[in-house]
Image: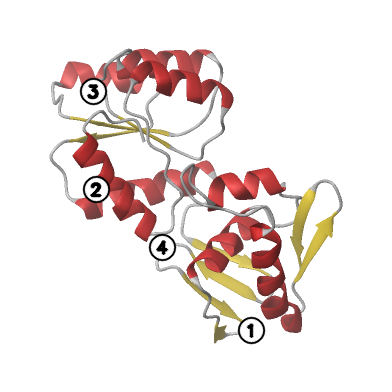
Amino acid sequence: MVEDDRQLATGLSAVLRRSDYAVDWVCDGSQADSVLRTDAFDLVVLDLTLPGLDGLAILRRLRARQSLTPVLVMTARSAVEEKVEGLDLGADDYLTKPFELAELEARVRALLRRSQGRATGIVECGPLVLDTKSRRATLQGRPLDLPRRELCLLEILVASAGTVVGKDQIASKLFSYDDDATPNAIEIYVSRLRKKLSPAGLEIRTIRGLGYLLQP
């Protein structure tokens, strides 16, 4: 999230974190441009009026680097010309302040689904069915009740089912910059989730030196 209004950014970050997104926040445009050059994100929520570097300049530089990261522009600028400019520069969606929190969350979900090549929030992997919208999972037709972090881990693995997901990639999605994550935290969550999935024939394989692989 790139937003210079601390109160707004704090509130929106809290809302998104309650929906189990790992949210990193920067308030300066130049800092945002620097972070986006080195770190990978699933989505950028971008304000336009920023100190250091304007949001449209950040967007222009991001697309010039051939980045396909979805960008949701969030701004008080409502002129049609500015919306057109932002979309032409590569923004994926546009949200004008003020807005309802439910609309922000819906747009975030839609952009993440689109970036993962899914038209709906329903994902299946063998006997597992995951609804990313309602954040509910069933295993062999029965509800699978998981703590928040285990559910997040399951979403990460299911989204990449059949391919190896690196530990660093999992950490970036599971934890924000300011989370106090111990080095073996991921192993603990993987172990707990593995025990719940294995009776149904779903295996989380550890690929030494690379990461984890979910497969029926």
Give the residue drawn at x 55%, y 80%: 144
Q: Determine the image quadrant of residue 129.
A: bottom right
Dot 4 and dot 3 residues touching (CB under 8 Å): no
Does residue 89 show up?
Answer: no
Q: Which mark is residue 11?
A: 2
Q: Nearer the viewer, mark 3 or mark 2?
A: 2
Residue assigned mark 4: 133
Task: Determine the secondary structure under disc 1.
Answer: loop
Q: Give the Cα separation between the discs numbered 2 and 1.
A: 38 Å
Q: Earlier in the sequence, mark 4 or mark 1?
A: 4
Q: Position of residue 168 (x, y in %)?
A: 67, 44
Q: Position of residue 52 (x, y in %)?
A: 31, 13
Give the residue drawn at x 52%, y 80%: 145
Residue neighbourhood size for the residue with mark 3, other residues' Cα within 10 Å, grouped as few (<14), some (14–19), many (≥20):
some
Q: Earlier in the sequence, mark 1 or mark 3?
A: 3
List the single residue furthest toward the bottom: 142
Dot 1 and dot 3 residues touching (CB under 8 Å): no
Check disc 4 and give the amino acid type. Answer: Lys
Residue assigned mark 3: 83
